[in-house]
Image (cartoon, rainbow, N blue to C red):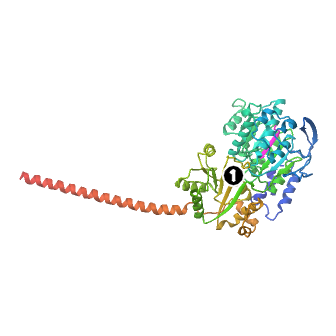
Amino acid sequence: MEFFRLLSRGAKLDNADAFGRKKTEDKKSDAERIVRELDFFHTKTASEKKSSEDGEITKRERKPQAKIESTIPHRKSNIRGSDIPQPLASFEELATRFEVSQQLLGRVRFNTPTQIQAEVIPGIMHDRDILACAPTGSGKTLAYVLPLVQLVQKINEEKKTGNVKALILVPTKELATQVLEQFTLLTAGGRAGVKANILTKSLLARLTSSANGAAEKTKPGDVLVATPLRLVRALDAIELEGLRHLVLDEADRLFDTTFAEQTDQILGAIRKQQQDSLQKTFLSATIPSSVETLALGLMVDPLRVLISPGRAAATVDQRLVFAGTEAGKLLAVRQMVQAGELPPPALIFVQSVERANALMHELVYDGVNVDVIHGERTESQRRAVVERFKKAEVWVLICTDVFARGIDVHGVNVVINYDVPQSAQAYIHRIGRTGRAGRTGKAFTLFTKDDIEAVKIVVNVMRESGCKVEDWMMRMGKADKQMKKQLKRKPSEREEIGTQVKKLKAVEDKKRKEKKAKREEERLKKTEKKKKKKQKDAENEQKDADEEEL
Ligand SMILES: Nc1ncnc2c1ncn2[C@@H]1O[C@H](COP(=O)(O)OP(=O)(O)OP(=O)(O)O)[C@@H](O)[C@H]1O
């Protein structure tokens, strides 16, 4: 049973009303009921999987459901599931425990695994399904890229088919590029016997013509990194038989309303074509309980790794700034620029494309080295902007939520939420663009008197993350549930950015036009005067000539 059909009956908890669900229904019991019905990957029949630690091959019967059997409370992370593998103390340990080659280990640029890597890497090496939640910037990408390179290398050594062995699904093209970069690094650009590709427009075209017999055979690569919409278009052209690993990076985003239908189609196609058992890894810095229930329902005997769930990265210093009005927000940003409180690289998040463009015009007017990224820019424009931002050719990047997830730009110092984000998840991901990989960063959220409800959500995250919360913030109370849903669905209505400036400009323009008209009038008068004088002179000359003749 496809999860989308089930979702449309009620498990799409974040946007339940859009699916016609009664508001009063109990989310949790609904999701649990759906999970009971779900058998997406036919996992209820016991399947045997290989597991190899210390070179030893063991056979294990996989269990059908998300059964929490043990927890290890002494670990800093909260990891649950049966037969929990030992965490990884060092990358070197991979050589002895899982026969990972020194060449591959040599390409890892770090000495010690992060907490999430310590748990997820052995989990994937043991062929376990994993649901992982860990803060932004904690190294979740390497946690799956490293073991997958090793495992796919092994598969290729045994039998090279050219089919996809590992599929990585991500919500944006920028994130896909970033993930591919990690694969490229660890596979030495494909020289290590594993070829990774992004599903680009041109690869999609080649795959489609090759499937239609119109062009020579094209293979997608051993590892394919794709965004949902493009992958849906490629489904008929890709052989998924032999697919052994599936990763949903930013899993909660892939299950939300924007992508749910496409993710469902992809999972349906995998189920149809893929014969062997499939190892699944779902990760995000935010996994709401509804998504957790749903994800666990798609897994077999999963490991659930929860590191500071629902919290923003502890390395981000979070501040709230009351700006009074929309015009006050612009003024606040201008003051920050002048006071040097926006050391580059910096990101400014707004809630819409129009607002991103408007804010950019304002800051360009002030001489700030700024650019903009949003969903209405072309793919090549987006790529170029990210490149320029990474090279510090752009100091301040204004973005919509397209840039909020997964993007890892070295050393972003400050994130400004020019518009208060619409959910706790959006807030956590946006501010997580700074304070990454152990570095510190600052996040400012500007708000007006109309943002009080949305700010309550931010205050709650701040409190949960252990941030200093002032008394006045505590007195705001909790956000209303209904309000939260409403906010998630639709951003707040706001006065246009730069309205005040526009008014001033309009007055100036009017004055300028009046001056110009006056100058023109004077010029015309002068010309007329000159003309008349010329005419008079000519008449006088004629008169003189006539008199001389007489
Ligand atoms: N073991 C490690 N030690 C130090 N730095 C690391 C380690 N592993 C990864 N990093 C670095 O940490 C940064 C963040 O990693 P990554 O982008 O994978 O984070 P993430 O957890 O996926 O974040 P997000 O939730 O925002 O997507 C990257 O620059 C990466 O190179």
Q: Please indicate whether residue 200 sits to the left or right of residue 100 in the image.
A: left
- The image position of residue 212, as x and y in percent, is 72, 34
Q: Quadrant of residue 481?
A: bottom right
* Residue 138, image x, y percentages: 76, 48
Q: Is residue 368 visible?
A: yes
Q: Is residue 218 above or below residue 81?
A: above
232 to the left or right of 379: right
Decide which of 226, 406 is in the foreground and name it.
406
SS for tag 1?
A: loop
The amino acid at mark 1 is Thr
Q: Observer-nearest residue: 295 or 1?
A: 295
Q: Nearer the viewer, residue 10 or 485?
A: 485
Q: Is residue 122 above or below residue 415?
A: above
* Image coordinates for residue 225, horizontal then vertical, percent: 73, 41
**In this view of the protein, can residue 19 be seen by the observer?**
no
Residue, disc 1: 434
Is 513 positioned to the left or the right of 2 in the image? Answer: left
Q: Is residue 387 magenta?
A: no
Viewer-closest of 380 and 333? 333
The answer to whether residue 246 is magenta is yes
Query: Residue 26, image x and y in percent?
Result: 84, 62
Q: Residue at x 81, y 50 (%)?
A: 3
Q: Based on the displayed image, in which of its 4 quarters is residue 197 positioned?
A: top right
Q: Which residues are magenta?
A: 242-248
Farthest left residue in view: 550
Residue depicted at x 31% and y 57%: 523
Numbered-mark total: 1
The answer to whether the beta carbon of the residue marked 1 is less than 8 Å from any atom of ligand 1 is no
Q: Residues within 10 Å of mark 1 (few under 14, many from 20)?
A: many
Looking at the picture, does residue 130 appear above or below residue 150? Answer: below
